[in-house]
Amino acid sequence: MRIIIAGDGKVGHMLTRQLSGEGHDLTLIDNDPNALEMTVERYDVLSIEGNCASMEVLRNAGVQKADLLITATGADEMNLLCCLTAHGMNPNLHTIARIRTPDYFESTYVMRKLFALSLIVNPERQAALEINRLLRYPGFLKREKFANGQVEIVELKIDKGSILANQPLKSLTQITHVQVLVCTVVRDGKAVIPDGEFVLKEEDHIYVTGSVKNLSLLLKNIGMATPKIRKVIIAGGGRNCFYLTQLLSKEGVHVKIIEKDRARCERLAEILPDAMVVEGDVSMRSVLDREKVREADAVVSMTGMDELNVILSMYANSVNVPQVITKLGRGENRELLSHLPVGSIVSPKDLCCDTITRYVRAMENQIGAAVAMHTIADGQAEAIEFVVDSSMKHIDIPLKNLSLKKNVLLASVTSGRNILVPNGDTALKAGDRVVVVTSGEVVIHQFDDIFNA
């Protein structure tokens, strides 16, 4: 497809890497010639320097022949104006806008047709929703939902002394007394899709799929269940903090926000009356001790500096805070951080790019396209959900009579209210929701792509 990306920042750069790797024809627009030069040197893309809302710039970028426009500049107003102008020049154009400002969220969603928006993405709000879900089930490092929330893939770490250490996966059900499936394991920084003979080791990060009920039982049965979160300390008072505090306050969680900027503290205190807002610098040990960080049920590090977030999370872990969550703005060093005690890692940029990539793939393949997609295992694998259609190949045939492509695993099948861990006798039927896990080397655009011809 012909895709225009306006904004060559963090999100724009990651999308360029992902979508150019999938063979799309990309054109980048940005005001910064140095940023464009660096991106063009790394990827096979075209670039246009200038204002993305200008008709002349859009015309030079080929908007009249483009299939999709993605706007990810630093200004929401610019993103909206660019989509509106481009759609006026090409009424058949699909448009995706990144909208981050809380004041604009409701109006742009309600009036998205007037703004000519096909999709709105809000990385900070997506991150807040993800963090809120993690806080509901302490123990999981990451949670991704599928099948309308009935099925999840969660990340766990095999700690020292865990009952899962040195056990083959074929014994998992016998040990845990619960029906789940380990679909991916990250060991020494490398992701593998294991079979039943694979033996788990301490320090492994495992990705487990199953029903929400069974995954909760798994935590309990392996001794990882922790008390419900009641007191949360959030470091940093940015957009992520606003969205997360709104969600937590509605659930009756006591939230304390620590922010060093006085003006921002005053604003947060005004718009978040149920939260306690404290002016302070979280890089100072005296502030952390004064605000009794060690007594919190959870600490969420979401300042604007990744390095500070990592240090704060390590400190919270050292004083035995039950749950620690670290927000990463960049996310490129996630593999290195997997060996550090920083708890769960959430990247707004990754969540945003996953949503956009799924939309792009759905545009290419209207029949059999993914309905959900999440990157797991430090970006080395993808978990993709499909809804089986009667027109698809390979349905009503036992899986033992079919051949899946290499590094592709069927993780779960949801048929009505029944959630199955598939085996050789499982036959997929129309209406089933199937979760597929694949290594990053294999790109799955539609359901039939998982099978060998």
Image (cartoon, helix red, strand yellow):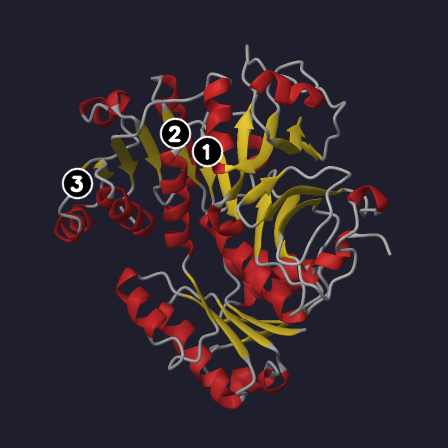
Mark 2 and mark 1 in contact? Answer it, CB < 8 Å.
yes
User: Vertical placement of 21 versus 276: above or below?
Assistant: below
Q: Residue 64's spot in the image, x, y percent?
A: 59, 87
Q: Nearer the viewer, residue 131 or 60?
A: 131
Q: Quadrant of residue 449?
A: bottom right
Q: Residue 433's spot in the image, x, y percent?
A: 60, 52
* Circle 3 residue: 277
Give the position of the C terminus as an image quadrant.
bottom right
Q: Amino acid at mark 1?
A: Ser
Q: Nearer the viewer, residue 103 or 253?
A: 253
For label 1, the crowd category at 10 Å Cα-Cα, with few meaning under 14, some 14 to 19 and many 20 or more, is: many
Q: Amino acid at mark 3?
A: Val
* Circle 2 residue: 324
Q: Residue 243's spot in the image, x, y percent?
A: 30, 51
Q: Nearer the viewer, residue 214 or 96?
A: 214
Say what secondary structure mark 1 lies in. Answer: strand
Q: Residue visible at 56% across and 63% down?
A: 34
Closer to the N terminus: mark 3 or mark 2? 3
Q: Quadrant of residue 393?
A: bottom right
